[in-house]
Image (cartoon, rainbow, N blue to C red):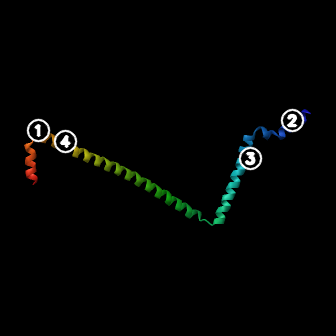
Amino acid sequence: MAKEDAGVIKQNEWLFDLLGWYRNYYWDLHNKNTTEYFDSLVRLSNIDIEQNRETNKEIRETVARINALNRHIKKRNAVKTLLIIMIILSALVVLGQLFQMFQAEPELLEILVVIAG
């Protein structure tokens, strides 16, 4: 009886190690089947693999150039925004200084009006 139980346990040993069984058998089987399936699809589609690789390389290079240009545009937009803010602030400072100057000496306003026409 003990020998029969040992034989049954050995036959069903894979049941106790399902993850190991999956990794050893089904993982490899799945990999083999999918590889064969995609190879058959490539043969059926008559794709030129080398041309496809070259096209993918060109696409990657183009995407890299686009990303570089986008970074460059973002930097320029940031500089442009900073310059606009600086111009507005400097105009406000000049107007504030003129306002203070005209309050201190009101006759300067009359002189500037005569000069301006």
- Residue marked by disc 1: 104
Estimate how packed mark 2 is, as few (under 14), some (14 to 19) or many (20 or more) residues with alpha carbons within 10 Å.
few
Q: Point out the frontmost of discs 3 and 1.
A: 1
Q: Position of residue 49 (x, y in %)?
A: 59, 62
Question: Whole-Å distance between the Cαs marked 3 and 1?
Answer: 94 Å
Tell which residue pokes out farthest to the right in this image. 1
Left/right placement of residue 25 relative to residue 81 reads right
Q: Earlier in the sequence, mark 4 or mark 3?
A: 3
**Disc 2 marks which amino acid?**
Ala
Number of residue marks:
4
Quarter that holds the C terminus: bottom left
Q: Position of residue 13 (x, y in %)?
A: 80, 39
Left/right placement of residue 35 relative to residue 62 reads right
Q: Residue at x 71, y 54 (%)?
A: 33
Mark 1, secondary structure of its residue: helix
- Residue marked by disc 4: 96
Question: Whole-Å distance between the Cαs marked 4 and 3?
Answer: 82 Å
Q: Residue at x 70, y 51 (%)?
A: 30
**Disc 3 marks which amino acid?**
Tyr
The image quadrant of residue 105 is: top left
Q: Earlier in the sequence, mark 3 or mark 2?
A: 2
Estimate how packed mark 4 is, as few (under 14), some (14 to 19) or many (20 or more) residues with alpha carbons within 10 Å.
few
Cβ atoms under marks 4 and 3 closer than 8 Å: no
Q: Earlier in the sequence, mark 2 or mark 4?
A: 2
- Residue marked by disc 2: 6
**Disc 4 marks which amino acid?**
Gly
Mark 4, secondary structure of its residue: helix
Q: Earlier in the sequence, mark 1 or mark 2?
A: 2
Question: Whole-Å distance between the Cαs marked 1 and 4?
Answer: 12 Å
Mark 2, secondary structure of its residue: helix
Q: Residue at x 87, y 38 (%)?
A: 7
Tell which residue pokes out farthest to the bottom in this image. 46
